[in-house]
Amino acid sequence: MSSRRRTREVVLQILYGMDLSGLRHVQAISDYEREFSLHGFETDDFMMDLIRGVQEHRDEIDTLITDASENWRVDRMSLVDRNIIRMGIYEMLYSVDIPLKVAINEAVELAKRFGSGESASFINGILDRISRNSDVVESGDSGEAK
């Protein structure tokens, strides 16, 4: 498993905890590290960028999710699904070093591992709809926001 995929798994767990508890990222990371002892896993810039980025852009991201999901409100989605979607959208819009297709694929892989039986197709559909209906363009090998 790639180190970035492992990082995404940890970020998903931290975002899940933040969503459930209402904690800010600094406290949530501290609690996670204390609870799970992250044996040999170090917080890095990629991890911190994902956590802070999703938190800072959460309202905008949730609006995109609402606009792209048919008959689903964000607050009615499972905690796992909505946090995978939030992370995927953040990577699509703000992570210039991550290609658009990679951001979507990584989200789908997280959904296969942590979501329900329908999560992967549900998440793929929403992220694909957002990628087609927003100002996100794939430029060469990097996903960049206009």
Image: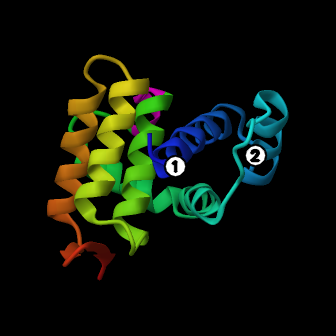
Q: Amino acid at mark 2?
A: Ile
Identify the image quadrant of residue 81. top left
Return the x and y of residue 56 as percentages of the image width and height. 59, 63
The residue at which mark 1 appears reads as 3
Identify whether 27 is placed above or below 75: below
Identify whether 48 is placed above or below 108: below
Q: Nearer the viewer, residue 87 or 135?
A: 87
Identify the image quadrant of residue 20. top right
Could you tell whether 54 is left or right of 135 in the image?
Answer: right
Return the x and y of residue 102 as percentages of the image width and height. 29, 56
* Residue at the (30%, 38%) spot, across then down: 108
Identify the image quadrant of residue 136. bottom left
The residue at which mark 2 appears reads as 29
Packing grade of label 2 (10 A; few <14, some 14-19, many >=20) is: many
* Residue at the (70%, 54%) spot, across then down: 43
Q: Amino acid at mark 1?
A: Ser
* Residue at the (55%, 47%) spot, across then down: 7
Return the x and y of residue 37 as percentages of the image width and height. 80, 33
Mark positioned earlier in the residue sequence (2 or 1)? 1
Q: Which residues are magenta?
A: 74-78
Secondary structure predominantly adopted by residues drawn in magenta = helix
Q: Depth-wise, is mark 2 or mark 1 nearer the camera?
A: 1
Colour approach in the figure:
rainbow
**Residue sticking out furthest to the bottom:** 146
* Residue at the (40%, 61%) spot, across then down: 91
